[in-house]
Amino acid sequence: MTRLQDISYLEKVVVEQSSLRGGRRETLPRRVDLYRLPWLRPLIENRWPQLVLRILTLGGLVFTITAGLFGTRVGSHNFAIIFVWIAWWTSLKLGFIPFGGRAWCSICPIPLPGEWLQQASLLGPKRPRLGLNLQWPKRIHGSWLQAIGFLLIGLFSAVTLTDPHVTGWVLVGLLIVSCGLSLVFKHRAFCTHLCPVGGFSGMYAQASPVEVRTIDKELCAQHAVKSCYQVCPWGLYPLAFQDSSACGLCMECLRACPYDNLALNVRPFGTDLSRQKSPSHLGLAFLALIMLGSVMAFSAVFTGPWGWLKSASFEVGSLKWVGYALGYLLLNLIFMPGIFVLSVWVGNKFTHDGNKLKQSLATHAQALFPLGLMAWIAFTVSFALPKLNLIVGVLNDPFGWGWHWLGRIDLSQKTALTGVSSLLQVVLLVTGLYWSVRVVQTISTRNGKPVSVMNLPLVAFSLLFTLVMMWLLVG
Amino acid sequence: MNKLTSKSWYWILLIIAGLAVLWVPLPASASLPAERHFQVDAKRFEYSPEVLKVNLGDQVSIDLVATDVVHGLAVDGYNLEVKAEPGQTAHLTFIADQQGTFRFHCTVTCGNMHPFMTGKLEVGQNTLLWRSMALAGLAAIMAIWKAQK
């Protein structure tokens, strides 16, 4: 259990602040505060359960890298490929993100060595900290770098997702970059500004039913020490939260608040969506469009019947691959943003929105979040679920060296999901479309306009995307 | 009361329209069952032709020719499987008695992209796709309509 009082350098100030009394403990509508559950609270307050999970995931990462670098090059027989791109990917898309937002970030092993070095501690923030502690350059704030990172993943996806050595080296590279950045910049610079997975987790976390929020804002504002901010590895101040995109759910703020003034809420899906966004959020709009373009490209490459496309995406450096790369970049950098900008611009003309185009783009991009989230889940259903049987295979023989750790087992049984998965994909895509249109409608309402002038071109954009995804996945 | 009635109408219409989209029969194919023969070349992550189109009830025979390494072909939903050695031809015959679109895929590890080596068997109309698209249009219309209320 770690309260603010446990942190020696803050102890004196806390005592001076102890006379503060809260004004109003706000109960947000339709919320359940998990931190008030008697059986769960000790598990959150105590850092050990989280540390154990982190050590397990870090051990898993080291094992995955070892298997990737030293195991067989045949992807479907290597632990690294199957665990990263089938097991982890599926659990991220079908579990962590839709139901837990950035919950994976709280146990992700990639930033851990850097964070432990930076904080000179395994069990929470202590001073003095190591490294240069520089501020991240303001010019490269936002989601732009994460979007570019995801574009790179897309360009090399066929190789990265199927070649264990490449997967192993990518993981090593991520570890090194993350560690290096932790020693140069403050807080979790890699996770906040570079990690492509963090980028889309944060974006789709706004649709998820989990949030950390301040209970009594007045009390928090009066508290001069800002103990939550002081201990946050991400450098965040919970009182300033407008949405859940940045919070990595590490729970440090809940542990540190001397007034027990933070809540870990379960809330309705999509609560963060349909707020007014400033043009500074344009990077997120760009990332959302790249996620839409990428899920279409991935669906075509990995689940489509076009062998020439698979070969083109796999043969990196060949003329065919250059063609694939140009097509992928055109789709993501020109085609999708072009149609989206045109939709919002035309919509603005008809609705007399009054907002400048950049602000409208940033605000209306929120309609793309549920659309993209559901499309990624639908893609994962046909990409990963039929291959779940391979997990048993690589548990039996992680390096593909002919071992039988689990004995001799029949791995020929495939998951028979054909009919069910198609129906599930249709339901997911239709849900995403309906949700997206509702977000467009709410944005229109919150702009103070009558709903009859909602942005119909954007609805048409969402419908068109859904139809294309249906054709790719069940066509 | 009015509000409740309006809401009720919304849901009643939504359910009726949804059921209509899902269950209204589509025009059936007029063609009689026939024998259909395909030679499918399998090489490095790719089947050629990649899409096989037949009518419901057709007797389908496939000659699978592996042109580089060993490849297999299994049709989802039909529980069929065949394997061809390099340079050899393997045969598969079946009655296309299930309507819809089915993926077929390689069953023998043939390289990095092996898990994604797929083709498509189209038996008659893909009614699931047309109904799904209609359902998507309906969802968009209902969401817009609800927004007017």
Image (cartoon, helix red, strand yellow):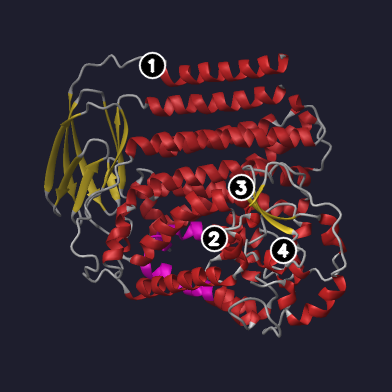
- Give the chain letter at badge 3: A
Name which residue type carries label 1. Leu
Give the label on residue A104, or none: 2
Displayed quadrant of residue A381: top left
Query: Are callouts 4 and 3 both on one chain?
Result: yes
State which region is magenta.
Answer: A152-175
Give the label on residue A141, or none: 4
Q: CA distance from mark 4 to mark 3?
A: 26 Å
Q: Residue furthest front?
A: A38
Name which residue type carries label 2. Trp
In this rendering, the count of numbered labels is 4
Residue B122 position (above or below residue B67): above
Is label 3 or label 1 in front?
A: 3
Q: Is residue A459 visible?
A: yes
- Give the chain letter at badge 4: A
Q: CA distance from mark 3 to mark 1?
A: 40 Å
Give the label on residue A209, or none: 3
